[in-house]
């Protein structure tokens, strides 16, 4: 008797004929297509060669930032980093 093997599907192990599996699969396809479309749109809007790119307003405001404001912004930006968020969350739950 030959061994039976089932190939993995996009539907996370559910029955291949399941409606919820098909809906989840199409949802992933649509989300991926939307991300590709947004990437193409951003790529098309980029500045051309020898064209000066305008920085975002918040970044342009850093030109006249004080030392205290720069320190605060650096602390905020390093805290928002996903890797740091996970490390800080794990530390806070294990600290005595």
Image (cartoon, rainbow, N blue to C red):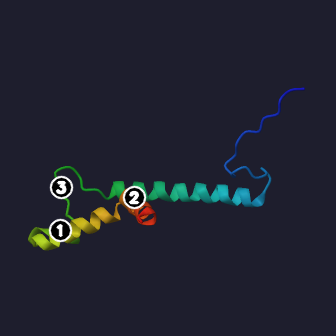
Residue plotted at (34% across, 65% down)? 80
Q: Quadrant of residue 87?
A: bottom left
Q: Can residue 56 be seen in this view?
A: no
* Circles 1, 3 touching at the beta carbon (< 8 Å): no
Residue 85 at x, y = what percent? 39, 62
| 37 is higher (above) or lower (below) than 10 | below
* Circles 1, 2 touching at the beta carbon (< 8 Å): no
**Badge 2: few (under 14), some or many (20 or more) residues near its Cα, within 10 Å?**
few
Residue 63 at x, y = what percent? 11, 68
- Disc 3/disc 2 C-alpha distance (Å): 40 Å
Q: In which quarter of the image is the C terminus?
A: bottom left
Residue plotted at (22% across, 69% down)? 73
**Badge 1: few (under 14), some or many (20 or more) residues near its Cα, within 10 Å?**
few
Circle nearer the N terminus (1, 2): 1
Circle nearer the N terminus (1, 3): 3
Q: Is residue 52 visible?
A: yes
Residue highlighted by disc 2: 87
Secondary element under disc 3, as helix, strand or loop, is loop
Q: In this view of the protein, which residue sits in the foreground, 71 or 27?
A: 71
Which label was assigned to residue 51? 3
Relative side of 74 to 5, left or right = left
Q: In this view of the protein, which residue sits in the foreground, 43 or 63?
A: 63
Residue plotted at (28% across, 65% down)? 77
Residue highlighted by disc 1: 71
Residue plotted at (16% across, 73% down)? 69
Secondary element under disc 1, as helix, strand or loop, is helix
Secondary element under disc 2, as helix, strand or loop, is helix
- Disc 1/disc 2 C-alpha distance (Å): 21 Å
């Amino acid at each position: 008797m030959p061994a039976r093997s089932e190939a993995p599907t996009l539907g996370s192990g559910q029955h291949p004929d399941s409606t919820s599996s098909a809906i989840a699969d199409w949802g992933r396809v649509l989300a991926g297509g939307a991300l590709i479309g947004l990437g193409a749109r951003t790529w098309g809007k980029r500045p051309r060669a020898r064209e000066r790119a305008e920085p975002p307003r918040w970044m342009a405001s850093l030109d006249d930032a004080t030392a205290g404001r720069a320190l605060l912004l650096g602390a905020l930006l390093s805290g928002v980093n996903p890797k740091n968020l996970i490390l800080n969350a794990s530390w806070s739950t294990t600290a005595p």
